[in-house]
Amino acid sequence: MKLKYSKGTITTVKADSIISFTFSDENLLKETTNRLDKFLNGQLNALISAGDFKGKEKELAVLYPTNSTMKAKRIILVGLGERDKITLEKLRRSCAVASKKAQSLKSETIAIEFPDYSLFKDKINETLDYFAQSIAEASVLALYKFAQYLTDEEKKNKKVKEVNIFSEKESNEIKEGIRVADIVCSAVYFARDLANAPANEIYPETLAKAAVNSGKKYGYKVKVLDKPEIEKLGMGGLLAVNSGSSKPPKFIIMEYNGNPRSNERYVIVGKGITFDSGGISLKPAQGMDEMKMDMSGAAAVIATMEAVARLKLPVNLVGLVPATENMPSGSAYKPGDILKTYIGKTIEVDNTDAEGRIILADALGYAQRYKPTAIIDLATLTGACVVALGYFATGMFGNDEKLMEEIKKAGEKTYERVWPLPTWDEYDQLIKSDVADVKNTGGRWAGAITAAKFLQKFVGNYPWVHLDIAGTAMLDKEYDYQPKGGSGVGVRLLVEFFRNKSKKK
């Protein structure tokens, strides 16, 4: 899909559908009516008079021009509600709903009339470029379809080919916002495609190839360690989880040096379980098909590396992905096993379905080699986090309040919101083992917290944040600009976090 910016007006832009916005305030709705009905022969006024359109949030009206000078087939007017209650997220959602409507009408080209920024500026405290970026992201992300395996040509080809955001006066700030949105949306699509792909397509080897290809294309280094190298490093956690699978593990190392003069280096780590059967502690059959998405953390990390490299952000960034399947077989690791990890700490296996934290233990230990400024990991780690926060917030845990606050700020701005949960010392007793340094589960209570406490034992004294994306990465239904299935969560959040870091240089 092509995302572009152009100079134009509602009469000069050619498109299958033009999206335009309006508030519900009486005077502002009247202004919209007077402006649009010049081309609509009173259609909008008739709708409003009949009570069929009031400009409420996400309310739609599809209108057909009668003026032969217009080059668009239709205008989709979308409501934003009251101006005093507008937020950036409400704008995103309204834009997303309108874009989906255009798609449902088989529009191949969509043009979005850039709204009057002066009407938003006092309510939405954001720069013009980010205002434009948000509109573009909402539209493009809403149009995502995982259609690679459809053979029905009508369904397969029901795609928007171009989104054109236009304004009457040319603006470099709007242009820049759309440029950034194009890169970010491409990365989110990449993450979604990786997560949604079936496990017979995406497994450790092909996940590693996706990272290698991205690195070659966009200019960051990628090194993939095979099983013999993983064995040499002593990554007993990754090797144990892999032991039941016929597909060998991979350890993916990605490096981007955007600021060679700086000693700061951030490490992001993604859980790469390409399919999780639960191992010997087998999962129930219901819902097991979703476990192809148990590598959503890995997908987010690879996609973030791509976006940061394409944006040429002045940061130094390392991405680490331990990748394996978790399968049951005669060679699979078992409850009661004791594993030795990369840093030498030992793990008592209480449940083989708590495997994500085991492979992350090796990766987090490896992250310490870089003497990182901070470590951030993303993982579809616990059902307990979904129970606690549902599908609307990512669980956040960490040992550094400033780092957590910066991530929370980025989450609020992108609306990939995070919510802090405690990592008090009292929770350590739940994962205490009689026979090893730590046990991989803590029982029924505080499951998301005990998983985070487990990970904390492998980060050393470095600033660290763990993001449990189990609920936000794997959605049970479609939302305004998030599809059912893999959401690509974490990419926009991390890109914004690193953009903020770049601005402070």
Image: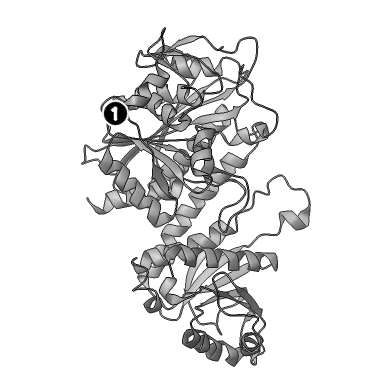
Query: Residue lying furthest top in this view?
Result: 435
The spot of residue 325 in percent (x, y) is 58, 24
Residue beneath the point at 49% across and 40% down: 388
Q: 83 and 180: which one is in front? A: 83
Q: Is residue 318 left or right of residue 359?
A: left
Residue beneath the point at 49% across and 43% down: 389
Q: Is residue 109 above or below residue 268?
A: below
The spot of residue 372 in percent (x, y) is 28, 32
Residue beneath the point at 39% across and 40% down: 396
Amino acid type of the residue tagged 1 in the rendering: Tyr
Q: Indicate the quadrant where residue 262 lies.
A: top left
Q: Is residue 302 above or below residue 156?
A: above
The spot of residue 64 in percent (x, y) is 67, 82
Q: Which residue bears the numbered disc 1? A: 370
Q: 377 and 66: which one is in front? A: 377
Q: Secondary structure at mark 1?
A: helix
